[in-house]
Amino acid sequence: MRRARWIPMACLLLALLPLLAHGTEAGGLDVFETTLDNGLKVLLLEEHKAPVVTFHIWYRVGSRNEQFGHTGLAHLVEHMMFKGTEKIGGQEFSRRVRRNGGRDNAFTSQDYTGYFVTIAADRIQLPLELEPDRMVNLRLDPAEVKRERSVVMEERRLRTEDDPSSALWEEVNAAAFKAYPYGHPVIGWMEDLRQLTRTDVQNFYKTYYVPNNAVVVVVGDFDRAQLLPRIQEAFGSIPRAPEPPPVRSDEPSQKGERRVMLRRQDARLPSLVAGYHAPNMKDPDSYALDMLEVILAGGKSARLYRHLVYEKQLALGAGAYYARVSAAPDLFSLYATSLPGKSVEELEQALFDEIERIKTELVSARELQKAKNQIEASFIFSQDSIFSLARQLASYEIVAGWRYWEVYLPGIRAVTREDVRRVAQKYLGSEKRTVGVLIPGDQQSTDSSQQSAVGSH
């Protein structure tokens, strides 16, 4: 019976994908796709509602491409990309963008590193001059590498080591992944950061910052027929490089619950995180898992907040997060923070009771339709922003192919109440979860199953 419910959605998606492969216009958007001779992928989407363009170049490299002992390299290289070339001095990249009324920035994830410039449409030549230069000619001064490494280490102290909640999420991820590099924190382990060298940075840059490992996405007020030759002129002379090494690790199937406890003197309230291994967007079940996330945690009227915060008055807050847009299977996570005076054991039991309920009872037709409306509205409203459009196209292209973006809403609309219960039963089993518990330093936990203390502060 499970398979019978799965097949119709899979058939729908398989039926849509071939159609989209032959036509660039679907879902109301006309995305042009091409690949230059050197392997650089280009996606162009004209949007003429304002005289602005956003130019993105994303590289298929993130923390999952790092080796043990060298975590944090992808993020450190992102920092170094703003340190200049022989042609463009340090910090000059952003100064030029700002002098022309634009803004720029970058970000690193598990799967990709992205750079963007949003600027007036008649200044599009600026990123076309700057980005090819730093793809090839990045200046890696040893003193600057050492200085920026210290900046990243301080960033790690501020964002993770001095933040009990962030530290708990990091420990849960590390415990959930034994083999696949999703267990690495994107910012890197402090012990690894201390040892990164200029040679490490240079080798990483030379390996991954090549045209055949990059995607250019431009959205905004331009003429495709005029812009494409300019992109060809800007990037076309950069030679193709050897293909970067693939990530070969596979995460073995989890055989039982894993549990970590983090005791922190600077934590004020107990909290917990439970991560379950779940498939990514390439799996048809991802649509029902997205729906499950919204039914559980799509606002203050959703199940977790309504039951744990309002009705039982156990939690200060509660939510869920499903990492669907990822290159490899990641986690479906639940989290909650206790109200003062309430134990984390009470909270945990209430949280898992909600999961058992959704595994045994069908959600109501109203809940399902409400979740579909929320997802569809969010997805459509996000298209109002050219930056958001570019970011979605780039992230989908990197992890699975941008055409998955176009079949997203049909996939969501096809989800049934039975699909939601089925994926909850399939993926939210106790044997597949990793539980992390944050205990304030002055409190005692009575849960005898909490066996390993992973840190203190």
Image: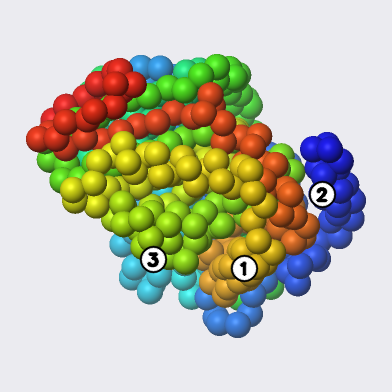
122, above or below 391, in the image: below
| Classed neighbour count for the residue bearing mark 3: other residues with Cα under 10 Å, few (<14), some (14–19), many (≥20) | some
**Of marks 2 and 3, the one in the foreground:** 2
Which residue is at a point 81% across and 42% down the rendered structure image? 6
Horizontal side of residue 72 vs 153, given as left or right: right
Q: Which residue is mark 3?
A: 103
Q: Is residue 139 visible?
A: no
- Please identify the quadrant where the C terminus is shown: top left
Q: Reading the chain from its start, which is encountered first: label 2 or label 1?
A: 2
Q: CA distance from mark 1 to mark 3?
A: 37 Å
Horizontal side of residue 397 vs 269, given as left or right: right
Q: Reading the chain from its start, which is encountered first: label 2 or label 3?
A: 2
**Amino acid, disc 1:** Lys
| Classed neighbour count for the residue bearing mark 1: other residues with Cα under 10 Å, few (<14), some (14–19), many (≥20) | some
Q: In which image quadrant can residue 202 be found?
A: top left
Q: Which residue is mark 1?
A: 370
- Which type of secondary structure does the marked residue at label 1 adopt? helix
Q: Is residue 408 visible?
A: yes
User: Are the residues at dot 2 and dot 3 in contact (C-beta closer than 8 Å)?
Assistant: no
- Please identify the quadrant where the N terminus is shown: top right
**Amino acid, disc 2:** Met
Q: Which residue is mark 2?
A: 9
Task: Compare residues 173 and 97 and report the one nearer the observer.
Answer: 173
Q: CA distance from mark 2 to mark 1?
A: 20 Å
Task: Compare residues 54 and 131 and report the one nearer the observer.
Answer: 54
176, above or below 402, in the image: above
**Amino acid, disc 3:** Arg
Q: How is the image coloured?
A: rainbow
Horizontal side of residue 123 vs 248, given as left or right: left
